[in-house]
């Protein structure tokens, strides 16, 4: 390099750094003004033992490898209180499990937060779809899906019937000791493909033909890599191994099969039943295979794993609480009165069933942790200062993690027995119901605000119907001999984007 080139390169770098420094300085001054205006004070700091907060990452990876990640997060919040700050890989990051702060982040100050860096982290697996989109593209996907998920589309519960019949058949063929968890993952795959894409893959009946095993292994593996990438936040790109790329490829191939099967000319001819099918609506807007694939994978992630986890945890808890199971059985018998044809209204009449599902989602919300990033400097209403009641400044670019799993176990919100599975609590007055903000934002398995879950009603109908049908058909459902009976929350868990049961949900069922 000639001296002239070298000095002009150095000059450009120097000017760049100066401009950056100037912007940072101005931003910091603006942040200080906001801090002073709102009376913000820092929340308690989660202490680090090593420089740059590397120890936090070590802790997380260790807890994850021991299948106890949620216990670690719960421990952090118990150490600090419900809002905290910490150094994470050299940058400041925040965490909260305070209802008023969740309201600000998810609703009142929705525009101050982005789902970033979710899109970049998950893109190799998810592609473009409702989970990874923002702005007008996200709104458009949401509008298309809203029509599909109106409850008139499944009021009769007919979309769930074949899959639950298939599930019952699989259980009848077993020797009476069954791990329900993998079967629930197939059940929700079958209902999601039928309802959202037009035709079920019937993986409960023919898992080999549709490549269900390859798909679920790849889907889980890809999600596990995605979760690891999440832990590094902006450094996510450091994790991109061949296994991750291969798993993404297999997931894409499965989605391509769905496209081929559902958008074939034959199905278009006999698919004129007048029902709204999401995939047809997407296909009308775009024939681009990559776009279709993205929407399919996003919806499989939303609809399959979440509801399968709810069902798995429900039975995990029921067989460990036989008195709850019996009370539920009695309610089902008296409401159905021998009637096997059910509709959604029947499920809603079963108050104890609704309580059981609510209580399961309180202890095991399918999406237990999530994050947002501040796109401009913003303020959380509470959590700072010595009394932890002052507003907290969240500077532009900082990540804010929230864990509904930890929030749902707060004794000050749910009572001193918050760790116990007790569906009856939903008929009582709980502490969180005494304050209007806590009432609305203290129980959030489906989150809230503009990005709240669109499938809440659908999922609760699917789970409720499955529980009722299984209890009607099988007189014995109990914990098999030798299965551990631990306190809730200490069993081993697997964290991908959802939380599932490490050792499955084994039941004796006849
Ligand atoms: C127990 C079952 C379910 C739970 C606990 C659950 C929970 C959630 C949560 C917490 C979110 C917010 C994610 C975020 O903002 O980062 C979400 C979003 C979403 N859920 Fe669900 N979900 C369940 C079932 C379903 C089902 C069955 C469907 C569809 C068939 C569905 C469709 C969606 C969609 C489309 C979104 C994205 C909304 C958006 O970003 O605008 N969910 N879900």
Image (cartoon, rainbow, N blue to C red):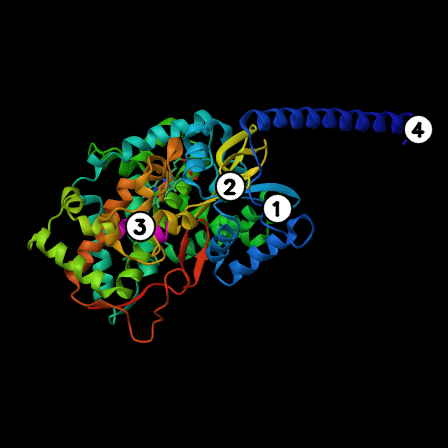
Instruction: Examine the structure image and report whether residue 160 is included in the region drawn in magenta.
Output: no
**On screen, 307 above or below 384?**
below
- Could you tell which of marks 3 and 4 lies nearer the N-terminus? 4
Bounds of the magenta span? 356-366
Q: Position of residue 388 (x, y in %)?
A: 51, 41
Please report the residue visible at 62 percent of the width from the left and 45 percent of the height from the top: 87
Drawn side of residue 499 relative to residue 174, left or right: right
The residue tagged 1 is 88
Crowd rating for badge 3 (residues with CA inside 10 Å; few <14, some 14–19, many 20+): many
- Could you tell which of marks 3 and 1 lies nearer the N-terminus? 1
- Could you tell which of marks 2 and 4 lies nearer the N-terminus? 4
Nearer the observer, disc 3 or disc 2?
2
**Helix, strand or loop status at disc 2:** loop
Looking at mark 3, is its residue's CB closer than 8 Å to ligand 1? yes
The Cα–Cα distance between marks 3 and 2, rounded to whole angstroms, is 46 Å
**Helix, strand or loop status at disc 4:** helix
- Could you tell which of marks 2 and 1 lies nearer the N-terminus? 1
Give the quarter the ligand 1 occupies.
top left
Nearer the observer, disc 3 or disc 1?
1
Nearer the observer, disc 2 or disc 4?
2
Q: Residue furthest right?
A: 3
Q: Position of residue 373 (x, y in %)?
A: 53, 35
Residue 387's disc is 2
Crowd rating for badge 1 (residues with CA inside 10 Å; few <14, some 14–19, many 20+): many
Which quadrant of the structure image shows residue 167? bottom left
The residue tagged 3 is 188
**On screen, 365 above or below 64?**
above
- Could you tell which of marks 4 and 1 lies nearer the N-terminus? 4
Drawn side of residue 425 relative to residue 449, left or right: left
**Helix, strand or loop status at disc 1:** strand
């Amino acid at each position: 390099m000639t001296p002239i080139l070298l000095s002009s390169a150095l000059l450009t770098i120097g000017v760049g750094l100066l401009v950056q420094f100037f912007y940072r300085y101005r931003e910091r001054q603006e942040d200080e003004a906001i801090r002073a205006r709102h009376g913000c004070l820092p929340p308690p700091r989660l202490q680090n033992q090593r420089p740059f907060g590397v120890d936090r990452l070590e802790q997380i990876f260790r807890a994850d490898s021991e299948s106890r990640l949620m216990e670690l997060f719960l421990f952090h919040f118990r150490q600090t209180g419900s809002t905290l700050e910490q150094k994470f890989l050299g940058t400041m990051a925040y965490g909260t499990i305070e209802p008023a702060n969740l309201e600000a982040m998810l609703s009142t100050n929705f525009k101050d937060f982005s789902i970033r860096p979710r899109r970049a982290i998950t893109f190799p697996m998810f592609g473009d779809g409702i989970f990874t989109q923002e702005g007008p593209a996200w709104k458009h996907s949401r509008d298309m899906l809203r029509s599909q998920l109106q409850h008139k589309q499944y009021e009769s519960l007919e979309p769930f019937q074949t899959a639950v019949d298939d599930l019952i058949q699989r259980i009848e063929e077993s020797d009476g000791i069954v791990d329900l968890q993998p079967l629930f993952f197939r059940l929700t795959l079958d209902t999601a493909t039928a309802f959202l894409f037009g035709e079920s893959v019937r993986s409960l009946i023919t898992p080999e033909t549709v490549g269900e095993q390859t798909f679920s292994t790849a889907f889980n593996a890809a999600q596990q890599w995605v979760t690891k990438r999440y832990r590094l936040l902006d450094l996510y790109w450091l994790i991109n191994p061949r296994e991750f790329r291969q798993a993404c490829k297999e997931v894409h191939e499965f989605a391509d099969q769905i496209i081929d099967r559902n958008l074939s000319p034959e199905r278009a001819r006999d698919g004129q039943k007048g029902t709204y099918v999401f995939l047809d609506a997407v296909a009308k807007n775009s024939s681009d295979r990559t776009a279709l694939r993205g929407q399919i994978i996003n919806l499989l992630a939303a609809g399959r794993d979440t509801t399968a986890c709810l069902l798995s945890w429900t039975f995990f808890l029921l067989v460990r609480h036989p008195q709850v199971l019996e009370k539920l059985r009695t309610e089902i018998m008296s409401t159905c009165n021998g009637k096997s044809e059910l509709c959604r209204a029947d499920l809603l009449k079963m108050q104890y069933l609704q309580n059981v599902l609510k209580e399961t989602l309180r202890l095991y919300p399918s999406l237990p942790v999530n994050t947002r990033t501040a796109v401009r400097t913003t303020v959380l209403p509470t959590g700072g200062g010595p009394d932890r009641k002052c507003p907290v400044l969240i500077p532009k670019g900082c990540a804010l993690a929230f864990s509904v799993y930890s929030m749902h176990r707060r004794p000050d919100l749910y009572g001193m027995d918050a760790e116990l599975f007790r569906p009856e609590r939903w008929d009582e007055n709980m502490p969180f119901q005494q304050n209007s903000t806590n009432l609305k934002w203290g129980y959030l398995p489906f989150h809230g605000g503009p990005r709240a879950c669109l499938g809440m009603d659908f999922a609760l109908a699917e789970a409720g119907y499955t529980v009722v049908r299984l209890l009607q058909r099988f007189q014995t459902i109990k914990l098999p001999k030798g299965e551990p009976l631990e306190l809730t929350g200490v069993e081993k868990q697997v964290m991908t984007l959802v939380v599932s049961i490490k050792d499955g949900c084994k039941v004796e069922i006849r």
